[in-house]
């Protein structure tokens, strides 16, 4: 069972006892993965083999959406450790994997120990297991395993008591169940193994009737085994067993129709069954609510009707909450998402810095508190020297250095802790950009090296996915020019190359066209850090011709003119654009300091509406620089 929220060691702010009580009694405990957890289906027969992968958000209803393609069209079985999904067991022995919170085609993981299909799949946070199957002309009793976070061929775990295929698999954090299937005839046998050991399966109990190609889901305590083909009829019954004990299954309810060859995926409160045959191929997705009991309810449709497909979830009952806590920064006592946007959003995400190589790591803080960063996930590309933009729900990182320039734009959904996904491409491949500005709808990326210096400005519509479009040009070609913004204007301040400058340019974000001179910084410098409210933009630190700077100066964004002294940061450093804000507080994260000649973990903050020196906020988990940082509450948002 998941922990109720809040936990005393994670809660932020003041919580009322009646809010906690209401959460437990009325809203329930929260599934691992939190809001936004996905179920997905891959491969299958439609009637020929399919390579389609698609997904839904478990706590909603609706039709499947395209995720990408498997490496080849085939029958598959799926597992997931909460980050990755693995699909294996087919007419070949290939195993594919994807990152569940991204979109895109599968990559090669390795091979099963022998070629077979109709296997059962299950996993906990660490191991993925495939058991049984059909390796023409015989059935298999083999059980394979591998560490889900690794790559490589699967390893022998042990054996089922009897060779069989068309087995249904489900998991708790400690056990995997193998239910039903076909030996020389169909069976009702349930067996189990312990994830932490190696060895042969042990008898668990029996299903209420014989079944092959049934579908299973789990809430971590119970397994719900549904449908399947008896002899010769299809079944619609859903039975349940308690995974920690060994006993026969009992009745839970019925599916909407008798069927076989479908696949189950879910979180800790809801289980989904997708696809199958009745005997015609089905595209139906239906769901059950574990606590309520009873029959399946219509959820939506798959994009392709098919059976013998694989499934996976990043919040299923085989996973413990240790690896996948809800993000305390994003939720209130009643579990609802904290308001986002200008004046409300408090989440800042730092990504893809240098230490001194390339990184795909993302870390997160809550701007209106104090403390150290915690892990958020990973971008699709390890790099540094990109540029950010964001609105209240989505954050983008564009370009950067991967050993050469990159045109890749990644995005994350800020309210969902997890990995980045590909958004599209910049108009020009470049790095050392630093300059990214945005309002509620549009993100603009400016300057950089190609490796020659660039004055390019290009833009995207943040809510869509696609390539950037030309916006116009900055007044001069330069790099490492940080950006900040109001609702209407974007500001680009200073540069490091071809030399340190004090030039400030501005654009109107909602239009297109070339930048216009705004005024000058108090000190010529580049690689600075910026933060803003709707009215004021602050530039902090940076690299001067002689040394790194601790100078902070500010401008009033709606006017034009030279910057005014604000105060000093806690450390003289160059951050390459690593600053962001809510509309009250600016935070400056990480960076490189000539003295002592090292990357830093320092995070400090200011109150934007006042002037004065920065104050210590906390620390990064790893010293780094040349990263990007974005927020869901900065000065460009309304």
Image (spheres, rainbow, N blue to C red):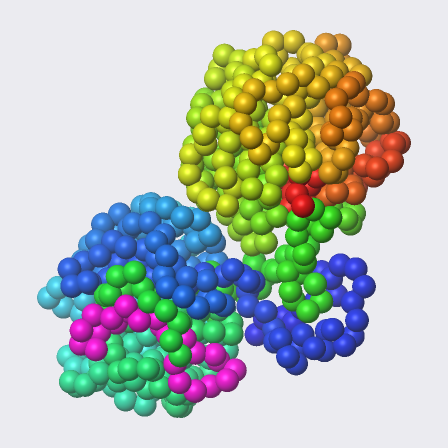
Residue at 33 percent of width and 46 percent of height = 105
- Residue 281 appearing in the image: yes
Percent x, y for residue 146?
Answer: 38, 56
**282 in the magenta segment:** yes
The answer to which of 241 and 18 lies nearer the viewer is: 18
334 within the magenta span: no
| Residue furthest to the left | 137
Residue 401 as seen in the image, left or right of residue 130: right
Main SS of the magenta part reads: loop
Q: What residue do we see at 18% from left, 73% from top?
A: 280
Task: Where is residue 232? Give x, y as percent.
Answer: 15, 85
Q: Residue at (56%, 13%) from the top-left corner?
A: 477
Q: Nearer the viewer, residue 113 or 494?
A: 494
Q: Nearer the viewer, residue 494 or 86?
A: 494
Query: Which quadrant, please, contains the C terminus?
Result: top right
Residue drawn at x 33%, y 49% as measured from the top left:
68
Q: Quadrant of the N terminus?
A: bottom right
Q: Give the x, y percent position of residue 579.
A: 69, 34
Determine the image quadrant of residue 207.
Answer: bottom left
Q: Left of 616 or right of it: where is 217?
A: left
Whether residue 198 is visible to the viewer of this picture, yes or no, is no
Tally of numbered discs: 0
> Which image quadrant is residue 328 in?
bottom right
Q: Is residue 384 above or below residue 133?
A: above
Q: Provide residue 219's location: percent of width, then percent of height.
A: 49, 74
> 596 or 479, which is in the foreground?
479
Residue 450, above or below 110: above
Could you tell whether 557 is left or right of 422 in the image?
right
The span shown in magenta is 273-296
Asked if residue 579 lies left or right of residue 178, the reply is right
Height in image: 31 above or below 21? above
* Corner quadrant of residue 192: bottom left
């Amino acid at each position: 069972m998941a922990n109720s929220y809040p936990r005393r060691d994670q809660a932020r702010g003041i919580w009322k006892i009646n809010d906690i009580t209401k959460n437990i009694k009325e809203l329930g405990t929260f599934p691992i993965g939190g809001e936004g957890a996905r179920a997905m289906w891959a491969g299958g027969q439609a009637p020929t083999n399919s390579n389609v992968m698609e997904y839904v958000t478990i706590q909603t209803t609706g039709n499947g959406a395209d995720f990408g393609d498997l490496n080849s069209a085939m029958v598959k079985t799926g597992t997931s450790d909460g980050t990755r999904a693995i699909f294996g067991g087919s007419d070949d022995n290939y195993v594919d994997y994807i990152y569940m919170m991204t979109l895109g085609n599968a990559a090669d993981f390795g091979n099963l120990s022998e070629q077979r299909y109709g296997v059962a799949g299950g996993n906990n946070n660490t191991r993925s297991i495939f058991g049984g199957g059909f390796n023409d002309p015989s059935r298999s009793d083999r059980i394979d395993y591998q560490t889900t976070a690794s790559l490589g061929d699967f390893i022998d775990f042990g054996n089922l008591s009897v060779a069989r295929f068309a087995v249904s698999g489900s998991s708790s954090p400690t056990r995997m169940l193998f239910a039903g299937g076909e030996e020389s005839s169909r069976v009702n046998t349930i067996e189990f193994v312990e994830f932490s050991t190696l060895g042969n399966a042990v008898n668990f109990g029996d299903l209420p009737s014989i079944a092959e190609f049934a579908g299973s889901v789990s809430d971590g305590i119970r397994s719900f085994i549904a449908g399947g083909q008896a002899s010769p009829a299809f079944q619609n019954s859903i039975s349940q067993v308690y995974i920690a004990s060994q006993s026969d299954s009992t009745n839970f309810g019925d599916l909407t129709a008798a069927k076989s060859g479908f696949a189950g995926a879910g979180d800790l409160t809801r289980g989904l069954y997708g696809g199958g045959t009745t005997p015609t191929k089905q595209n139906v997705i239906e769901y059950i609510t574990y606590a309520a009991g009873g029959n399946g309810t219509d959820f939506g449709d798959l994009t392709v009707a098919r059976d013998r497909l694989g499934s996976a979830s990043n919040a299923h009952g085989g996973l413990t909450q240790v690896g996948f806590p809800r993000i305390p920064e994003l939720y209130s006592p009643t579990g609802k998402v904290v308001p986002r946007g200008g004046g409300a959003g408090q989440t800042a995400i730092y990504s893809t810095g240098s230490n001194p190589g390339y990184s795909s790591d993302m870390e997160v803080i809550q701007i209106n508190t104090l403390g150290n960063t915690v892990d958020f996930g990973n971008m699709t590309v390890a790099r540094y020297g990109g540029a950010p933009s964001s609105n209240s729900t989505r954050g983008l990182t564009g370009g950067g250095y991967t050993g050469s320039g990159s045109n890749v734009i990644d995005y994350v959904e800020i309210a969902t802790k997890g990995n980045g996904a590909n958004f599209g491409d910049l108009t020009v491949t470049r790095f050392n950009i630093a300059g990214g500005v945005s309002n509620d709808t549009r993100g603009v990326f400016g300057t950089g090296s190609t490796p020659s210096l660039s004055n390019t400005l290009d833009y995207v519509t943040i809510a869509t996915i696609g390539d950037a479009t030309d916006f116009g040009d900055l007044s001069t070609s330069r790099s490492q020019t940080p950006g900040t913004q109001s609702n209407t204007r974007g500001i680009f301040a200073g540069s490091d190359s071809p030399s340190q400058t004090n030039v400030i340019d501005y654009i109107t974000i909602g239009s297109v066209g070339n930048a216009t001179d705004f005024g000058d910084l108090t000190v010529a410098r580049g690689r600075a850090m910026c933060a803003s409210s709707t009215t004021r933009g602050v530039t902090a630190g940076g690299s001067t011709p002689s040394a790194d700077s601790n100078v902070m100066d500010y401008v009033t964004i709606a006017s034009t003119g030279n910057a005014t002294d604000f105060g000093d940061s806690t450390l003289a450093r160059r951050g390459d654009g690593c600053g962001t804000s809510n509309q009250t507080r600016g935070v400056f994260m990480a960076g490189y300091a000539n003295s002592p000649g090292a990357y830093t973990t320092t995070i400090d903050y200011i109150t934007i509406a006042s002037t004065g020196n920065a104050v210590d906020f906390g620390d990064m988990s790893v010293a780094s620089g040349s990263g990007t940082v974005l927020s869901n509450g900065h000065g460009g948002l309304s």
